[in-house]
Amino acid sequence: MSVDPKYVLPNLAQVLADRSHPTITAWNRLEGRPRRDDLGRALRAEVRDALWMLTRQWQTGEFHGEDAGAPIAVKVAMRTAPVTAYQPAGSATATYDGTVPLEAQVEQRPIAWRWNEQSMRLDLRAQVGRQWATLLRAVGMDKYLSSYVARYPFTLPARDAAGDYVFAHRTSWQQLAALAGRTIDGGALLEHLAKPGTKASDGISAPAVHQTKLDAAGGELRAWFAKLYLQPAGDAWKPPYLEYQSACSVPQDGHETVLTSTEYAGGHLDWYSFDRAVGSTGLGAVGPQTEHVTIRSFLPAPVTFEGMPDPRWWALEDRKTDFGSIKPSTTDLAQLLLMEFGLLYSNDWFLIPFRIPAGTLARIDGMVVTNTFGERFWITAAGAGLEENWHRWGMFQLGTPATGATADTSLFIPPVTVNTLEGEPLEEIELARDEVANMVWAIERTIPSLSGGGRSGKDEARETRQYHEALVMSNPKPPEAPHAPIAYQAMTGVPEHWIPFLPVHVPGSTREVQLQRGSMLRIIEGDRAVEPPRVPPRTTLMREGLAVNKPYYIHEEEISRRGVAISEQFRRTRWIGGQAYVWLSVRAQTGRGERSSGLAFDSIVNTKR
């Protein structure tokens, strides 16, 4: 059998180098074949090389580890004391017994029944009046209902400039007209009962035995309203600072430890809202001043969390936490510390559960840890030392704002609520800077309507001005004929829901300034008034001091370039005993930035022909 000459390769190496005969290469693969029916031993991933294990430990740095044992027993001496006193800034101290959430105690504001000598909050007035009628029927005194309707009536004001809060708004006029002459003004009755020496039977012609029943029912009405709506004995809201200021005291080491909250803007009261007062002699609280020392032993448990490395060599972590997808910026220190903790030090933390009731200031007097080698260690707080030492490590600790003060390692758990229900805002004010006009504007975005709910301040201001313009047009002043095509305009106008705050010098200082509330004039063409009236604020928050004819100042540093947004609304919560509490609260938040009112002075305008 002869071979084709083309398949005779005298120099195989040269042919392969030149690739003269390209072919498809094929090969065989060696595969292992199990000798048993089950795969148990194959899945063990047995390692029979001890040197590999040693080098793996060297690679991960285990040979540099400390020869320390794990904690197996802990004994703790805990000193605890409850909050016993509460004091709104500038008011008297009251005993705190924990029946009312501290958050409600701090935030509660008085309910104003009238402003500008005008009766407001028709909804609450009608609610109290209906409750009074119910109490009269319960004691068999319902025959005096008509007498109370006549003594505490809802009345419509005169249709003039002073009645603009009713007749300028169709809905308000309809609601007040529906109540007038038909029901009792409960707000007026409560205002009467709040005066010293007054009784519910005042002005009601009735026998002495009936007057006694009416007076008793009046006491029940006051108790019912106080239970339904919390009313403060002292207001913690400080208008010049746009924040709440309060203090509470706790017995500690035989004296009162005062915790102050001076920059709380509303929302949620927690431990970070308090600082320890240095040098305070106490609030002068009366009542039990007792501390409790509890000694307990624990078995410490390792701290676990989602995504932590598994301590076993051959365990695979799940994909619930993907550290690769975390992309912190170079200035995001919190994320970097959290990643370092989770990846390097997660197995070094142990948990010792100690239950502490709410409303308690707790401090560890001593902690002893016993490890697996039988060694005992006295543990001191990591955050101990001077407050100014930035090398300290502290968490959930109270601040001590004083030079050279010792850090407070106590843990404060305030008696506050977890969740609250918030009603729709009754008032919303935006305090914004206007650099062109060199002032701050308080823009009343939401104002309380006559019926009690919140209403758009812009719409309310527009309707009020239209009402006053209609009054002027009903008795117009003859216009003067223009003598020139242009005229001098001293000042332009702004919407009536914009309230100016002007910078003024602080008394005794030539550099420091503060913001004083002003008012715009309501100038209507054709008005015969000798002096244009001032536009009053429509929100209670901006009416500070008007009832006693005092100016209202806001500290200039409280209004940043971002501005401040303030809102007022009712809040409701249920406390640990099942009681429900409702209070009127205020919240201050960061604003929306600078605003421009368009206010201009000394301008030339074209005259109308």
Image (cartoon, rainbow, N blue to C red):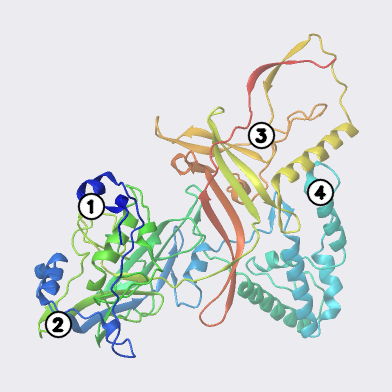
Q: Is residue 594 left or right of residue 329?
A: right
User: From what the image shows, is residue 202 above or below residue 537?
Assistant: below
Looking at the image, the residue that sits furthest to the top is 484
* Horizontal side, residue 601 vs residue 371: left or right: right
Give the left or right position of residue 288, taking residue 224 as reference: left
The amino acid marked with disc number 2 is: Asn
Query: Sequence-wise, which precedes: disc 1 or disc 2?
Result: 2
Image quadrant where one finds the C terminus: top right
Disc 4 and disc 3: Cα gap in Å? 21 Å
Q: Residue at x 22, y 54 (%)?
A: 390
Q: Quadrant of residue 259?
A: bottom left
Does the rendering let one see residue 259? yes
Residue ID for mark 2: 371
Q: Earlier in the sequence, mark 4 or mark 3?
A: 4
4 or 3: mark nearer the eye: 4
Q: Secondary structure at mark 4?
A: loop
For the residue labelled by badge 3, is the local secondary structure a helix, a strand or a loop? loop
- Type of residue at label 1? Thr
How many marks can you see? 4
Residue 136 image offset from top left, x and y in percent: 78, 80
What residue sits right under mark 1 in the picture? Answer: 403
